[in-house]
Amino acid sequence: MVVVRPFKAIRPEATLADKVAELPYDVVDSAEARALAQDNPYSYFHIDKAEIDLPQSISPYDEAVYQKAAANLADFLQKGWLEKDGQENYYLYQLTMDGRSQTGLVACTSIDDYAEGKIKKHEYTRHEKEIDRMNHIRSCDANTSPIFLSYRENQTTQQLIRNWQDTHEAIYDFTSYHNVHHKVWVLDDTAVIKQLEEAFSSLDALYIADGHHRTESAVKVGLEKRQEQTNSAESDSFLSILFPEDELLIKEYNRVLDVEIPSDFFEQLQENFEVEETTEKSPSAPAEMMMYLAGSWYNLKVKENNIPTDPVGKLDVSLLQNLLIAPIFDIQDVRSDKRIDFVGGIHGPQKLEELVDSQNGTVAFSMYPTKMRDLLQVADAKEIMPPKSTWFEPKLLSGLFLHDLETK
């Protein structure tokens, strides 16, 4: 069983929600955040990327940045731009993009469930990124960004959520980045809250879709406070938004390489792939990828006897890495090798053409997207996906929900 509990959210005053809410801290850099927040004093970037309110020369990891984040959070609360609810609630968060919707339950999940493997991961984390969010959480004494979790289809939870949406008015209703429509409901009926708690307790596991660094950081701060005996009931849990797997969309994560193309490149390709020039720019099936090189597109179809059966090896990003990128270009560590870059699928294959045509790369690969069933299989097997395997859309906005750890 897993623990999914209500909490007293810190959230925007209703008329300010669209002005406060911003993209996640890790999808924009400091310069972009500074530009987006320039004429908006309500922007959550003043809290989530507080370096925008300090000299441009300062490192985003300087202690002054975390102090500024805490000061700005206190200021938002003092001015009433953010307010803390007086009772423990669940919240529903619906995102609609290109005609399809997904609805998540905003709640707190247990640091012990993560430590015991009931909240399953599929990515490694980097220590320096953990330290950043741990410092942010400590300074603000709050989970300042939600974790994007998923769960296997559960008719009881989904029916309770749909019923609430159908019979109650949303408190927030606005359109933001990339024309995504955002709606939020407060679920404050104690009987329905209990039903949802019981329904989620029947699940064997939850799965991290996006936010591995935020999860690791939140859990480590919670355990740290417990060890120091400064913990509270709130610091033993962390802020999450839980979506059913069947509502989620993973887009492709494309690759661009800046490498020297060997004279026998196509001969090497044909050892593992069936190669054909094409006018198509996006693959239509697994074990197939499109390559853009010197102004032309090629279909690369992996030969069947080269496709492993294990959950990680059969992923398209693994096939490309193991059969082409590593053996032909000797790019072994995609996390650190400067010759490879990654482009989220929301930008489309035209972005790949633009990068190669402008000589910001020599060859690009348009990938078939990883499916949720693949992610769950990898997590269940306690395996790790290659870096940059999934690009979830739409992105959850930050600033709509914060979780007070109540340890200060």
Image (tube, grey):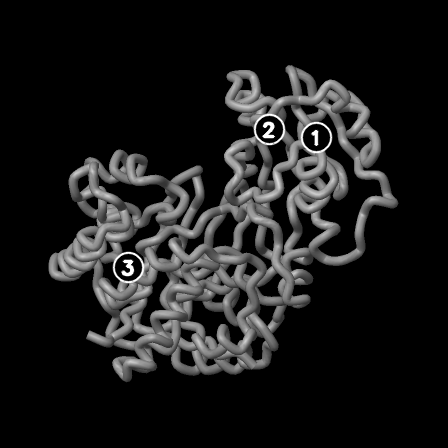
Q: CA distance from mark 3 to mark 2?
A: 36 Å
**Disc 3: CA contacts within 10 A as few (<14), some (14-19) or many (>=20):** many
Q: Nearer the viewer, residue 210 or 268?
A: 268
- Report the mark closest to the observer, 3 or 2: 3
Which residue in the structure is indicated by mark 2? 349
Pair 1/2: label in front: 1
**Which is nearer the eye, 111 or 152?**
111
Q: Which residue is mark 3?
A: 136
Label pair 1/2, CB-CB below 8 angstroms: yes
> Which circle marks residue 361 in the picture?
none
Residue in the foreground of this view, choosing between 189 and 116: 116
Q: Above or below — where is 43 with respect to 158?
A: above
Q: Secondary structure at mark 2?
A: helix
Amino acid at dot 1:
Met
As measured in the structure, the alpha-carbon distance from the residue carrying label 3 to the one carrying label 1 is: 41 Å
In the image, taking residue 352 as reference, residue 301 lies left or right, namely: right
First in sequence: mark 3 or mark 1?
A: 3
In this view, 186 is above or below 371: below
Q: Is residue 247 visible?
A: yes
First in sequence, mark 1 or 2: give its number: 1
| Residue at far front of view | 330
Quarter of the image for residue 255 reads top right
Which residue is identified by label 1?
Answer: 290
x, y percentage for residue 201? 54, 81
